[in-house]
Image (cartoon, rainbow, N blue to C red):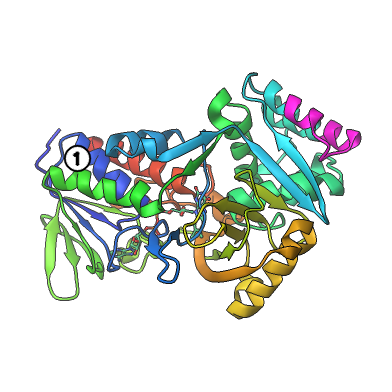
């Protein structure tokens, strides 16, 4: 294992930083991390809201107990104490009625899920029966022939799931975990998420809720960890091209070039990559997430995770704030249409949805709000794109593709990016 190899990690989101910290941990110190933007963090970053003084994220992120590589990463960089673990419990709001779905923490999978589902009033007896059938098919088969090429809705229909069950349970899960509509998301992703969350370890279905901003949890501690080992993250340094050269790779920036033995690329766009690598890569399509933060004048929510049915609004996550009684982080996935609206229109739609779903909201006031559109929140993983996600080991020797798009069978998430980051670091000694 040659620890002196010159390595470039391109991109300082969680994908790049997990790759780099894992390499540093293994003793690779001749390493540079380059980030195009002014600040590290990519799609997981936080900033100060000037009016309230609150630290807010570029969008609410929820982590799950099955995020095993993320937990290892947090431990390595020393921020694992900055998450709160709560057993899965969701309040579903629909036209003024609230139903709770909770997974009891004291029994083992899949009995905890079954107990939670059968004791909840969210589903009718018939829906519970069909949901159990789906769970059994995912756990031990058979899954329909060719499900790998299906969208989620095709899988649900093949498994004879009633429309009402799809609407109440499967669709919210697909939207939240894949950021895609059920008629677009790959069924493979749903099946793999279901297995990891509900059929793995007992703690796999827990929510891991960050108690600090995403930058404080995932980004700054990683940069400090590397700085202590003499490894720098250089921001405002877009890589313009990567070409093979006699002694490795020539990486070109705006005003100079540098040479490396090995390059790990974690960006979403492939323009900077050598031309040969573009063939065979999937189409670049993205799915939008619209986030809103509402500061409200009374504390209405007393549990952390709320789902909404029959509304544009999909999820709400309340938090304490020094500026107002409560701050709500609201999210809408697969939100291309909504994102085309003005901020005031989005505020109005989401506020109306909150009031329709929760009667107490009607006497509350929104004293400040922020709308954040992430138009390239995640790659759109249709069945065809899912099957063509690039492998970590690219066709060009010593060039690794990581980040959340690289293939690992799970949706483009923090865990997906970090899993690929650690796997990329595992590959380095082999190359
Ligand atoms: C609003 C929102 C909500 C989300 N919610 C969740 C959630 O609840 N749970 C979850 O697990 N995931 C969620 N995700 C997805 C998660 O944020 C991403 O999957 C993850 O952050 C991807 O990390 P990455 O490092 O692969 O990519 P990025 O974070 O995009 O990092 C890539 C970095 O590379 C840089 N870069 C690109 N090209 C170059 C170049 N040529 N030179 C130098 N630098 C370059 C970019 O500037 C960027 O900083 C959400 C995403 C968004 C946007």
The quadrant in which residue 344 appears is bottom right
Name the residue at 28% across, 39% down.
77
The vertical placement of 400 against 342, above or below, is: above
Name the residue at 19% across, 75% down.
254
**Which quadrant of the frame does ligand 1 lie within?**
bottom left
Q: Residue furthest top?
A: 107
Q: In this rendering, would 70 be left or right of 345? A: left
In the picture of the structure, the residue carrying the numbered disc 1 is 24
The vertical placement of 140 against 188, above or below, is: above
What span is in magenta? 114-130
* Position in image of residue 184 (x %, y %): 67, 58
Viewer can see residue 291: no
Q: Quadrant of the C terminus?
A: top left
* Position in image of residue 419 (x %, y %): 41, 40
Bin the neighbour count of mark 1 within 10 Å (Cα to Cα): few under 14, some 14-19, many 20 and up: many
* Position in image of residue 56 (x %, y %): 45, 60
Q: Determine if the magenta segment contains residue 120.
A: yes
* Position in image of residue 406 (x %, y %): 43, 49
- SS at circle 1: helix
Name the residue nearer the viewer: 231 or 195.
231
Viewer can see residue 48: yes
Name the residue nearer the viewer: 240 or 329.
329
The vertical placement of 24 against 47, above or below, is: above
Q: In this rendering, would 34 be left or right of 326? A: left
Q: In this rendering, would 81 be left or right of 258? A: right
Name the residue nearer the viewer: 375 or 278.
375
Q: Main secondary structure of the magenta part?
A: helix
Name the residue at 19% across, 63% down.
251
Q: Determine if the magenta segment contains residue 366.
A: no
Q: Quadrant of the N terminus?
A: top left
């Amino acid at each position: 294992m040659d620890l002196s190899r010159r390595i470039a990690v391109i991109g300082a989101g969680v994908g790049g930083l997990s790759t780099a910290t894992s390499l540093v941990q293994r003793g690779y110190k001749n390493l540079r991390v380059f980030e195009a933007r002014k600040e590290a963090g990519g799609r997981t970053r936080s900033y100060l809201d000037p009016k309230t003084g609150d630290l807010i994220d570029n969008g609410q992120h929820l982590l799950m107990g099955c995020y095993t590589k993320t937990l290892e990463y947090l431990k390595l960089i020393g921020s694992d104490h900055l998450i709160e673990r709560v057993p899965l419990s969701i309040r579903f709001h629909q036209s003024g009625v609230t139903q709770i779905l909770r997974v009891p923490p004291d029994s083992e999978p899949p009995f905890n899920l079954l107990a939670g589902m059968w004791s909840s009033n969210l589903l009718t007896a018939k829906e519970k029966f069909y949901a159990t059938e789906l769970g059994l098919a995912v756990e031990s088969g058979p899954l329909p022939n060719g499900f790998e090429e299906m969208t989620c809705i095709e899988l649900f229909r093949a498994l004879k799931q009633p429309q009402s069950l799809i609407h109440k349970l499967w669709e919210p899960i697909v939207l939240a975990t894949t950021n895609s509509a059920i008629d677009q998301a790959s069924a493979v992703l749903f099946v793999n998420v279901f297995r990891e969350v509900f059929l793995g370890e007992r703690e796999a279905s827990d929510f891991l809720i960050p108690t600090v901003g995403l930058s404080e949890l995932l980004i700054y501690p990683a940069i400090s960890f590397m700085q202590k080992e003499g490894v720098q993250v250089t921001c405002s340094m877009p890589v313009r091209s990567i070409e093979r050269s006699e002694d490795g790779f020539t990486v070109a920036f705006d005003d100079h070039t540098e040479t490396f033995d090995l390059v790990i690329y974690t960006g979403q766009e492939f323009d900077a990559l050598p031309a040969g690598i573009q063939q065979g890569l999937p189409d670049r399509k993205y799915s939008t997430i619209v986030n809103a933060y509402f500061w409200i004048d009374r504390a209405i929510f007393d549990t952390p995770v709320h789902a909404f049915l029959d509304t544009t609004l999909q999820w709400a996550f309340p938090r304490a704030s020094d500026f107002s009684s409560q701050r709500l982080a609201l999210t809408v996935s697969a939100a291309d249409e909504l994102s085309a609206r003005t901020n005031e229109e989005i505020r109005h739609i989401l506020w109306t949805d909150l009031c329709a779903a929760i009667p107490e909201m009607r006497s509350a006031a929104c004293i400040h709000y922020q709308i954040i559109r992430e138009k390239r929140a995640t790659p759109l993983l249709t069945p065809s794109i899912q099957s063509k996600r690039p492998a970590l080991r690219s066709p060009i020797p010593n060039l690794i593709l990581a980040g959340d798009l690289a293939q690992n069978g799970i949706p483009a998430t923090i865990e997906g990016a970090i899993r690929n980051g650690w796997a990329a670091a595992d590959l380095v000694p082999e190359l």
